Image: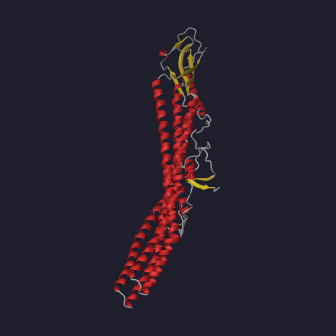
Amino acid sequence: MRPENPRITAISAAILLLSALSLVSTLSCRQLPNRPATVADSPSPVGESIALVQHESTPEDNGVVNPLPLAEDIATPTPEEPDFVGGQSVEYFVGIAVSGHPRIRAARARVAAAANRVPQAESLEDPLLSNNFYPISDQALQTAGGRAGNTLSLAQKYPWPEKRWTKGAIADRETQIAAAKLAEAELEVEEMVRLAYYELWFADRALKITDDNRQIAAELVNLAEARNAAGGSQQDILRAQLQLDALDNRRIELRRQKAVAQADLAALVQQPGMMGIEPTAEIDTGQVPERLDALFAAAQECSPRLRERRWAVSRDRQKQELACLGKYPDIILGAGWQTITESAAISPVANGHDNVNFMVGITLPIWRDRINAAIREASAEVAASNRDFTDARDDAFRQIRRLSEQAYAADEQLRLYHHRILPRAKRALQLASAEYRGRQVDFGEVASGFTEVLMFELQVVRAQATLAGTMAQLHRAVGCEVIVDEQ
């Protein structure tokens, strides 16, 4: 056989190396299909007719990963300028806040980041391509077939198949946890918007009530002056004027309270400098749920906090399974090609035939202490996550029960104010004013009745705002709207 030029041999090896790299980059894009995962601890179906309106963003769980938005788009959102002319409903502000709040946008980006960890977890490790060569001819390896020029080898590690599936299942559950945190962030922002809006509504309504009562107080001043002109006491005029001064002082405090609520609401809709946010004349407090068991059942299905804990339990169980799979070996497959040349060969029978070899290897999981410790660690994590779920469920039920009791109390107070207390207080004020004109009572009775009417009217709107805020907190604790069919 004709002797080979070492330079030509090196060039051929380089070309082969580049071809192998191209082949490896093509093969490494192939992935195993996702193994269907079953969550063993999914909530049991509720044995009653309950309609649930889910309140969460739909994560990209259909296997298609959409491209991530640019970093500058996430960091510097530019929401459209909202139109706050006139009174806007609370749903209007909730929609703006949920669509563009930085906390929610950050949670959405984390969901996208977690979704891209699944193909990484299921992918094979990069193959190893190596090339051994002998630059000094008289120091090269000599064989019967001739002098060895260089040796090109390619090796790929294949983990035990279930290891890759389990890693993918762990990453998938991390994505579900991120999606649950996104839903929790949406509920939190919605609750903040509603509470700020209801506080704004209370301050606005309290200002209107105070302004209306100021007109009544001005009439009381005129009544005291007329009584004084007919031989009454000058003290009645001063006490009536004090009522006006007290109302002016209350108006100052209410204007400050309204401005603070406007600032909070403007910040939540990403317009901290916006002025003139006004609420609607009335708010919808919603229907107070009467069945506590229905709320508990709905929270089991809808609560993002409980859903996050359930996925954490499932994830830790997969980690425990992965730790158990550490007992099984990984497989390494490889192939090699060695160039043989007759140039500078010392063998009298050198023929320049190249060598080809294949390699099969396995890892030896012999360090049992490490493997068993990993299994015990994973088992402890499963136990901890189960306790965390139980604690979160009990705490959610506690919050639901407390908020339900607060809602019941606020609703009963509203009915009591509307049907009994407020009508009687207004009637008492009318009688006191009439008797004061007839010189049957002093001005103190009129002033006391006026103060009671004002206090009760303010307590009515405060109870309405409290009930609406409690329902918003209850909605966050449950995680969805609950409609119970009365049967």
Residue name at image x 52 percent, y 60 percent: 408
Residue 336 drawn at (x, y percent): 57, 21
Relative vertical location of residue 323 with respect to residue 181 in this rendering, above or below: above
In the rendered structure, the answer to whether residue 464 lies left or right of residue 65 reads left
**How is the model colour-coded?**
secondary structure
Residue 369 drawn at (x, y percent): 45, 25
Can residue 152 be seen at all in this image of the molecule?
A: yes
Residue at the front extreme, as displayed: 440
Q: Nearer the viewer, residue 5 or 409?
A: 409
Relative vertical location of residue 402 with respect to residue 450 in this rendering, above or below: above
Q: Nearer the viewer, residue 42 or 373?
A: 42
Q: Nearer the viewer, residue 442 or 353?
A: 442
**Quarter placement of the N terminus:** top right
Residue at the right extreme, as displayed: 487
Residue 343 drawn at (x, y percent): 54, 15
**Quarter placement of the C terminus:** bottom right
Q: Nearer the viewer, residue 109 or 186?
A: 186
Quarter where residue 282 is shown: bottom right
